């Protein structure tokens, strides 16, 4: 089963500009792709930015008055 999967994937990569590959590429990158991508990525960006901000304001000051980091 593994060899069959590898053979099919190698065959599909061997022909990146054949009509079948163009149809598949158009269906994957077609309508709705960017919308779904943004909906999947934005929550992680917001949580990461909020976490970085909370980490930054939570650092204790050093003896000379500057923050650590």
Image (cartoon, rainbow, N blue to C red):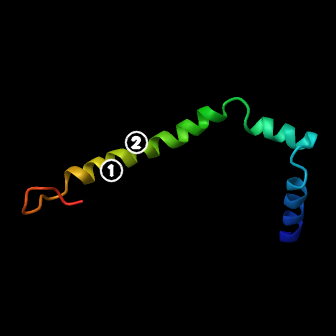
Which quadrant of the figure contains the C terminus? bottom left
Which quadrant of the figure contains the N terminus? bottom right
Q: Residues within 10 Å of mark 1 (few under 14, many from 20)?
A: few
* Residue 8: image location, x then y, percent: 89, 59
Residue at point 60%, 32% (across, down):
35
Mark 1 vs mark 2, CA separation in Å? 8 Å
The outermost residue toward the top is 31
* Residue 51: image location, x then y, percent: 32, 50
Residue at point 48%, 39% (across, down):
42
Residue 23 is left or right of residue 32, and the answer is right
Q: Residues within 10 Å of mark 2 (few under 14, many from 20)?
A: few
Compare residues 43 and 53 and report the one nearer the observer: 53
Residue 67 is left or right of residue 34, and the answer is left
Judged from the image, the secondary structure of the residue bearing numbered disc 2 is: helix
Q: How many marks?
A: 2
The outermost residue toward the front is 64
* Residue 46: image location, x then y, percent: 40, 42
Labelled disc at residue 5:
none
Of callouts 1 and 2, the N-terminal one: 2
* Residue 27: image location, x then y, percent: 78, 36
Residue 29 is left or right of residue 56, and the answer is right
- Identify the residue position indicated by label 1 in the image: 51
Residue at point 87%, 61% (across, down):
10
Residue at point 39%, 49% (across, down):
48
Residue 6 is left or right of residue 43, and the answer is right
Compare residues 66 and 57 and report the one nearer the observer: 66
- Identify the residue position indicated by label 2 in the image: 46
Name above or below for residue 68 compared with residue 16: below
Compare residues 34 and 61 and report the one nearer the observer: 61
Name above or below for residue 66 compared with residue 18: below
């Amino acid at each position: 089963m593994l060899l069959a999967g590898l053979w099919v994937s190698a065959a599909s990569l061997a022909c990146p500009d054949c009509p079948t590959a163009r149809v598949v590429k158009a269906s994957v990158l077609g309508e709705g792709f960017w919308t779904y991508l943004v909906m999947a990525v934005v929550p992680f960006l917001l949580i990461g930015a909020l976490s970085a901000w909370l980490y930054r304001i939570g650092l204790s000051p050093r003896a000379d008055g500057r923050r650590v980091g």
